[in-house]
Image: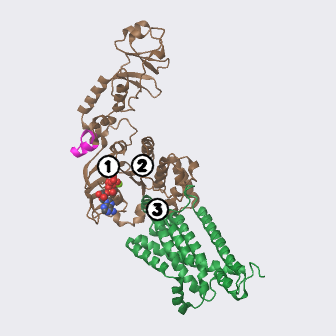
Chain colours: A green, B brown
Amino acid sequence: MSGFFDIPSDLQHSWAGLIGLHLREALIPVAAGLLLALPVAQLCGRFRRLYPPVLGLTTVLYAIPSLAFFVVLIDYTGQTELTVMIPLALYSLVVLIPAIVDGVRSVPDETLAAATAMGLGPVRRYTQVQLPIAAPAIIAGLRVATASSISLVSVGALIGNQGALGNLLAAAQKYDRPELAVNAVLTMAVLAILCDVLLVLLRVLLTPWMPRGARSGTKSGARPGRFEEAEVKAL
Amino acid sequence: MIRIESVTKRYPDGTMAVDRLSLEIPDRSITVLVGPSGCGKTTTLRMINRMVEPTEGTILLDGADIQRQPVTTLRRSMGYVIQNAGLFQHRTVVDNIATVPRMLGWGRQRARERAAELMERVGLDTALAKRYPYQLSGGQQQRVGVARALAADPPVLLMDEPFSAVDPVVRKGLQDELLRIQEELGKTIVFVTHDIDEAVKLGTMVAVLREGGRLAQYAPPAELLSDPADAFVEDFLGADRGIRGLSFLSTTALELTTDPVIPPDATAERIGAADAAHLLVTDGEGRPLGWSEPRRLTAGDIRPDRLLPYGRPFVPGVDSLRVALDCAVLSPTGWAVAVDDAGRVRGVVSQQTIGDAIRTAHQDGRTAHQDGRAGDEKVLG
Ligand SMILES: Nc1ncnc2c1ncn2[C@@H]1O[C@H](COP(=O)(O)OP(=O)(O)OP(=O)(O)O)[C@@H](O)[C@H]1O
Ligand SMILES: [Mg+2]
């Protein structure tokens, strides 16, 4: 009988290799999503009328099943990781954009007025005042986006074994080895928790200025509803 | 000098916030803009540092149109303090204060030294330097706000209701501190408040604005209190403007008498000789102990615990007539006790005499008011 960590050779990776692959496929989209969300959120903050349609658009994107994305993307990017990562990056926008917009809006008017009155131009105001104060909200958004991304990577199994740990689920069926499915689910859960812990640590490091006890960071961005949605989607 | 010349601000939605306002703001003094909510005080203040651009009119700083220089340069030459301080919550106290110096390219070390120096100047313990704003009281935050505004030593300080969010005791402390700082640094301060008492206390000149952003009166506080321009100003000043106006009258010329003042070892003859309903007994050094009717005093056996309290004394030439009157009103005998700096009795004065002094002062006319900034730790421009 083969062991818990014996990965069928057709997956072409060891267990550790699958973990590395999984993290890469999950985290690069979140980072890309953040890079895209920052300027979009800035525009939404500037031009308030832009925000509702942008939110609507991200929700629509989120509602498109990944399979549909794959069908379209496969013509351009083939059966590659990229095909998996592009929809994941787009999905992350649905939490990241509101997290950043709300975070930036949470900067008190007085603080902004003071910054303007001191002669800080728009760029300095954004980088030195708004972004640092929005950091807790942004990280709260990142936590949701990361957890959901880690579970969503699995669907990559649908296109030629690009689902990293998710491929184990298919292999479990194929080889009738249920322990591989358990392995996949547990490993993903542990990865999600570890990433979450790291993000919480990052927030603590970045925000020595927050009153203790008020650090739960649930003020904006991290909408519990969206988290559940993400989990449902992963199924 | 800042000259506001016929400035009008109409917001895009049609709100007339400021209507053809003209003001000359003298250098090195505190000019207060006061008026009811929505009368355009903040708008006026923000036009001075161009956070709001006027619809019409010009503002001159030392003779030059403020439109002619880069807006960031203009703003860095003007400190700005607002309600709730508007501190950067993500920066420590020193880093908050050092913001503008750092932006002006000062080295970290020099900026921090400057910040520490300013903390002392505004009465903040330098042990608070590494704290974050959430770890400070409202009054301390406000002091940091003032220190931050002063950091690059700007000649002009714009203050928008800076002390309105703290309790009265802290507010008084902050006001006194501001007067002291102003005396030391001689900044040109434009101070916005809706509190007329604060305006009268701090202002060298006070501009009263009315709804619609029109100027109702521009005058020194004493003149404002004695000669309100119209019913609006009078109403705004409140019911006791007469009493408050006494803050600007000096007690130097007040006639004191030492007749009812007796030492603790007074003889029976001395007690009998005094022609007064009450006598003020002092201790051996001449400090007041309390009042007593002459018939209740036994020479050689004066018991301090049997005396009536003498209330609060005033210092002639330092305290205003308002303080003297207050002392007389609070005194159980109707007489106010005048003391010197060391607390020794210089004499006593009756409500009657104070009343006469007030009438004389009023007869002497408004000219006396205008330079008569007696009492209160006032700062002249
Ligand atoms: N950005 C704006 N757009 C439109 N109207 C404005 C704007 N800012 C202020 N106003 C209006 O202009 C008028 C003057 O406002 P301002 O803030 O100068 O009053 P204020 O005297 O400072 O009042 P307060 O004592 O309440 O602070 C008010 O009627 C206000 O509603
Ligand atoms: Mg205002």
What x and y, as percent, mark residue B256?
35, 22
Q: Is residue B227 found inside the magenta-colored segment of the image? A: yes
Separation of marks 3 and 2 at Cα, in angstroms = 19 Å
What x and y, as percent, mark residue B241?
28, 38
Q: Badge 3: few (under 14), some or many (20 or more) residues near its Cα, within 10 Å?
A: some
Residue on which the image places disc 3: A107
Question: Looking at the image, which is closer to me, A95 or B89?
Answer: A95
Chain at tag 1: B
Q: Amino acid at mark 1?
A: Val
Asked if the residue at label 3 sits under 8 Å from ligand 1, the reply is no
Residue on which the image places disc 1: B34
Is residue B214 toward the left or the right of residue A107 in the image?
Answer: left
Say the numbered circle drawn on residue B97: none
What residue is rendered at 69% in x and 76% in y? A183
What residue is rendered at 30% in x and 53% in y? B24
Residue A110 seen by the camera: yes
The image quadrant in which ligand 1 is located: bottom left
Chain at tag 2: B
Which is in the foreground here, disc 2 or disc 1? 2
Tell me the SS state at disc 2: loop
Q: Are marks 2 and 1 in contact (CB under 8 Å)?
A: no
Q: Amino acid at mark 3?
A: Val
Magenta segment, which residues? B224-236
Q: Badge 2: few (under 14), some or many (20 or more) residues near its Cα, within 10 Å?
A: some
Q: Name, please, the residue furthest toward the top.
A: B269
Is residue A25 toward the left or the right of residue B297 in the image?
Answer: right
Separation of marks 2 and 1 at Cα, in angstroms = 16 Å
Q: Name, please, the residue furthest toward the front.
A: A176
What residue is rendered at 67% in x and 82% in y? A168
